[in-house]
Image (cartoon, rainbow, N blue to C red):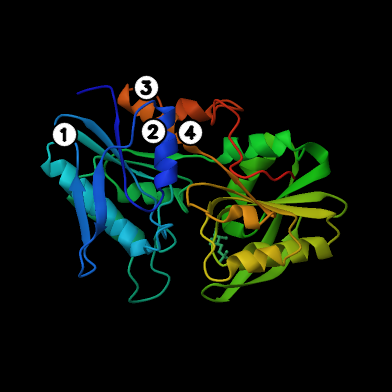
Amino acid sequence: MSHTPLIFSGNSNPTLAEEIAKRLKVHVGKALVNKFKNEETRVEIGENVRGSEVFVVQSICKAPNGNGVNDALMELLLMIDALRRASAARITAVIPYYGYAKQDKKTKGREPISAKVVANLLKVTGAKRLVTMDLHAAQIQGFFDTPVDNLLALPTLCDFLKREGLKGNEIVVVSPDAGGVHRAELFAKRLESSLAIVFKRRPEPDVSEVTDIVGDVAGKIAVVVDDMISTGGTLAKAAEAIKARGATKVYTVATHGIFAGDAVNVLESSVIEKIIITNTIPFADLKDHPKFVQLSIAQTFADAISRITTNRSVSELFNGEDTGAQDPSPVLETATV
Ligand code: R5P
């Protein structure tokens, strides 16, 4: 099998796929990925892939061309199927944002486990491994019997915070809910800061309420760390509560900026100073929103793909303080903290 990876992309995050390919010094493979008139997804791979190591880059999220989350999933599955039938030697699904991840268990009777359904679909279509980033729950790796590389945005995000002086005793890292405490602890360790925890409850799906805060935030700059932002309610309400407890400023960082519905307005009109996210999910009109900062995690994916192709360790990427991105991660739009 060739050591040169072939990169293909669907429509959900083509800019990131291009960036990853550029850093690997390859091009994004030719593929027609659109729809038939009847709305069914149409895929046609435009290059020979026989015997090749192939990576399909596709986040399971809304696409800049207006396609929905389910279109992204279907494009991914049909591309993998087409590549397998075209005799690719090994196909890796590169899913920077693994959608459906929040539905990873039954919380009440007669619910699906959607994250497992996605894993099953990837398996039957022929993906031999998964490369993803900051899975909502690390246990989702267990839904796969093939290798999963769950990359971290933490080094990229922490490098940025440090460059902006957000580190040490002046800041407090805050988890916006009990489920995120481990993630926040890792950030607090890297940033050499203290830790606080917001307790929230969800009276109904997509609605959050703060019930308590544990830890000292008074007189400090709070950096609230989450894996994803959907409606923005969790972070907006956490920021309000943290400020009411005496924090001087509140910044937020999250790997995946989904920004469902009115989320951008909710965050923009909140007390949050800056909302720092990565480009696992595209955010097209950033320049109109000065509160938002988007960092590129392309180098991390490029490094992982390069290591997989040459049978080197992927976990080594995350052993050191600054190894997530070899070059400082580009800020995709100018915005200073
Ligand atoms: C919850 O478990 C997640 O880590 C996020 O806190 C949550 O998905 C954010 O959702 P929203 O922005 O809708 O409050």
Is 216 in front, or is 62? 62
Q: Is residue 297 left or right of residue 334?
A: left
Disc number placed over residue 300 in the picture, else none: 4
Q: According to the image, label 3 marks what residue?
A: 312
Q: Is residue 303 left or right of residue 27?
A: right
Q: According to the image, label 2 marks what residue?
A: 21
The span from disc 4 to disc 1 (Cα, nearest Å) is 27 Å
Label 1–label 3 contact, CB within 8 A: no
Q: Comparing marks 4 and 1, which lies closer to the viewer? A: 1
Q: According to the image, label 1 marks what residue?
A: 48
| Amino acid type indicated by mark 2 | Ala
The span from disc 1 to disc 3 (Cα, nearest Å) is 26 Å
Q: Comparing marks 2 and 3, which lies closer to the viewer? A: 2
Q: Give whichever of discs 4 and 3 has the lower sequence position.
A: 4
Using a 10 Å C-alpha cutoff, classify the residue at mark 3 as few (fewer than 14 neighbours), some (14 to 19) or many (20 or more): few
Q: Is mark 1 within 8 Å of ligand 1?
A: no
Is 243 in front, or is 281? 281
Q: Give whichever of discs 1 and 2 has the lower sequence position.
A: 2
